[in-house]
Amino acid sequence: MADPEPSWEWYRTFLQVLETGSLSAAARAMGLTQPTVGRHVDSLENALALKLFTRSFDGFKPTEAALELQPYAAGLASTAAALRRVASSQGSGVRGTVRLTASEIVGVEVLPPILSALRSAHPQLTIELVLSNAADDLLHREADIAVRMFQPTQEALVARRVGAVRLGLYAHKRYLAAHGVPKSMDDLASHAMIGFDHETLFLRRMQAQFPVFARPGLAFRADSDLAQLAAIRAGFGIGACQVGLAARDKSLVRVLQPVFSPALDTWIAMHEDLRESPRCAATFAALAAGLTRYIQIG
């Protein structure tokens, strides 16, 4: 008798055990019982004729086979989620679910009013927002639409540049009252600088142009844009901030404007297969219009 075709639920459980490292944690996350999770794993192992986990002192440890299967199971999860989004949009008008991905700072500080207006215009639209600075792969349908600060390069994408987000150096007026206003980039060496903890290609280029942002000289390090913005707002020191965001807070003061004024190209992208989708077309257009207005503030 042939082995049964593995159920999608077994793969879903497999991914959850991989993520949580135990049957009990996976069961809590999925709203299942621990014995049910165990049966799913056993059934998948039997169907594939593979050992996927071994028990260790601190939970379930994935085997080499499990780690090789992980990206394929994750692909199934992305496809299943995309299928549900497409199914939810069936019918007339703009309706269903759109999954967006954007950086933390854009997703939290910039997109909410744009998405609120979009929802008011299309009440049957549901938004899923993934906050990530990583380049999620639209080709694998991990998201329907991405807002990114770089030009997407995949040929199967519809991409539109909406402009350049201007950056400036800002500090709370309380900090400047206590520590003085820098008159040159060299003066920043005596100030509490705010920046990133881990380097990226973009940051290395920024540091080459502005050495003051090199990691050893920073008084506050965080890879979260939101954490850096919170530190600036709290008066911790001086850091880079989008001009459009700083314009909303009169207590933030821009310093060294002529010297420090880099810009980040901003793009919206989606898979070309979604071009004719009413839900995605409406969302794409709303994002383009809203982000263009935001960029013009800077």
Image (cartoon, grey):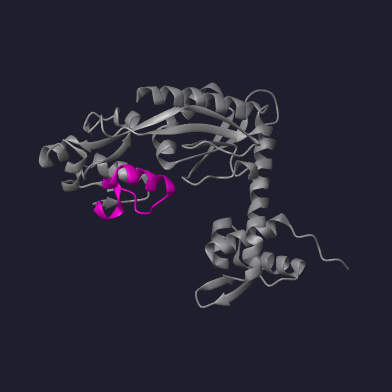
The residue located at (34%, 46%) in the rendering is 208
Identify the image quadrant of residue 254: top left
Q: Quadrant of the C terminus?
A: top left
Direction right: furthest residue? 1
Relative height, residue 54 to residue 87 (above, below): below
Choose between 79 and 122: the one closer to the eye. 79
Evaluate whether residue 99 shows in this view: yes
Choose between 26 and 210: the one closer to the eye. 210
Q: Position of residue 265 (x, y in %)?
A: 45, 32
Direction bottom: furthest residue? 57
Choose between 16 and 255: the one closer to the eye. 255
The residue located at (70%, 31%) in the rendering is 90
| Relative side of 19 to 201, left or right | right
Residue 204 within the magenta-colored segment of the rendering: yes
What secondary structure do most residues of the magenta stretch adopt?
Answer: helix
Identify the image quadrant of residue 38: bottom right
Relative height, residue 254 to residue 33 (above, below): above
Relative height, residue 297 to residue 150 (above, below): above
Q: Position of residue 270 (x, y in %)?
A: 60, 34
Choose between 204 and 45: the one closer to the eye. 204
Q: Quadrant of the N terminus?
A: bottom right
Evaluate whether residue 97 shows in this view: no
Residue 298 within the magenta-colored segment of the rendering: no
* Tally of marks: 0
Q: Position of residue 104 (x, y in %)?
A: 42, 42
Q: Magenta segment range?
A: 195-218
The residue located at (31%, 45%) in the rendering is 228
The residue located at (39%, 35%) in the rendering is 109
